[in-house]
Image: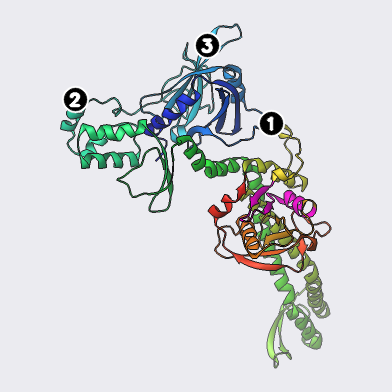
Amino acid sequence: MAFDGLFIHSLLQDLSPTLVGGKLTKIYQPFEQDLVLNFRKDRKNQRLLISANAQNPRFYITNDTIANPDVAPTFVMVLRKYLEGSVLQKIEQIGVERIVNFHFSNRNELGDEMQLILSVELMGRHSNVILYNADNNKIIDLLKRINPDENRARLLLPHAPYELPPLLPGINGFDLCADNFNDLKEKYPEPADFVRQFNGLDGDDKKEFTGYLEDDFSYSSLQTFFNQFNRPKGYVLQTIKHKDRVYTYLPYHLELNLIYSNDDVNKTLDEFYRDQANREWVKQKSKRIENIVNNELKKLKKKIIKLRKQLDQAENSEEYRIKGELLNAYLHEVKAGMTSIDLPNYYENNKPLKIKLDPALSPARNAQKYFTRYQKLRNSIKHVNEQIKLANENLDYFDSIQTAIDNADPQDIDAISDELINQGYLKEQNHNRHRKKKISEKNLNTFKLSDGKKVLVGKNNYQNDWLTLKKADKRDYWFHVKNMPGSHVILQDSTPSDEDIKEAAEIAAYFSKGKNSSHVPVDYVQVKRIKKPNGAKPGFVIYTGQNSIEVTPNEKDILEKRIE
């Protein structure tokens, strides 16, 4: 179920009593299309997340602590000027549309009372958040300023009059009385046609409503269907294609399996969107560094292919030596000005071998040219092997950066960016300068195993080095996936049981490039056997005396062990 009109109606049943009357104390924009509004009411703080993301526009109260960026965008500065310190008077949905108005009361610089509206429009790629003055209906500012050429239906720029977007006609099911129901039923006797006349329903709602009416085409069925949106609960159900969806009611006419339920709709939404939102936010923050990583990976892969061709040519250079020898042996048969000659190859039973010649060179110089080419290729083998080794090391390094991004939380991206800046792959943007944060245990992922032992996991290469080489006790056990990028994992125990080793290995497998594989080999060894070669890139270590175990990481089991 998407954030359609009925879903929003349900959500507001819980949201309005929690927020209305609260004071808006903080506003920030952690990501390009996401806002966080902090309300203070009854000595409690409530964080309202509003997202105008085209794929998943939404709003709900979140318990997640989302980092406040160092530099506030323009829209947030405007919101702070007009709304910080204001009181939320009411939350109003426009009919059963995907438009919700948050009404605020505040005072301007002269002390006069102002009525302001923050309009949240959850309409796919047209989603937006618009602040306008309720007294004169003029837009003050908006999250997405739209060029008039891109939207001719209405003007979405500061100082323009606020207008509602074009809305489709339809019936609000919450307002329909019994007489109107009977008139409508007479006009549309088929349940499917009847349902199509209503607003605010997504595809699943329409199927469910149709099912109710097919069971009993009565006003009572309509009331039963719509009344459940006034008593919402949170349900997560799975489709036959194993896709999870969130609902505020429990559908009976859809092919879905219930996997989670909670009386608190906001809590359900917060948990449902947590991983998805993290991925969206990481994608937004990491866009610049992912471009660098992808470009470097492409260049390195091409370079390795080219070097391997050179190596193959060098290792198969005997043909040049043989041609030089044959020319010297039959030098008397080679005449000046010849472009080629066939000579018996005594290495292959005197089988004729065609040899190309440079007509500008003497016979002896032609022979010497082949020997020189042969020697050059033989001498290049060592250099080419060194270049291949270096390119593979760099490939592994950028592979590790990509794996760190894939496993990162939004707040981890800055550390990865710092690493690329320090390694010279990324230029620091002056307007985005931020104070380098010292690594500590609270930066790491922390897990508690079944018997209570603690496991620490690095999130990036700098954290991996710090965890393994500085934080860990020499008697602790170190885990890492075999022959692929992944996090350094430390089990803080010197005598782990077989079960401890298995659980720690599963964590190491999960935080690696092989997290989605069925059988992941993981090396483990005591920290005292880990060494970092001089000049090695961040995160790279060598070790000896390791043991290995093959595990299958299970996301649910692993994340249940995580300590927030």
* Magenta-highlighted residues: 444-469
Q: Marks 2/1: CA distance?
A: 58 Å
Does the image show residue 101? yes
* Picture layout, residue 510 above or below residue 334: above
Whether the residues at callouts 1 and 3 have beta carbons within 8 Å, the answer is no
Nearer the N terminus, badge 1 or badge 3? 1
Q: Is residue 253 left or right of residue 110?
A: left
Q: Which one is in front, 379 or 48?
A: 48
Q: Is residue 116 left or right of residue 364?
A: left
Near mark 3 (Cα within 10 A), the count class, few <14, some 14-19 or many ≥20, is some
Query: Which percent across, then down, holds residue 409?
Result: 62, 44
Q: Is residue 563 left or right of residue 243?
A: right
For badge 1, the amino acid type reads Asp
Residue at (55, 54) in percent of width and height: 557
Disc 2 marks which residue?
179
Whether the residues at callouts 2 and 1 have beta carbons within 8 Å, the answer is no
Q: Marks 1/3: CA distance?
A: 30 Å
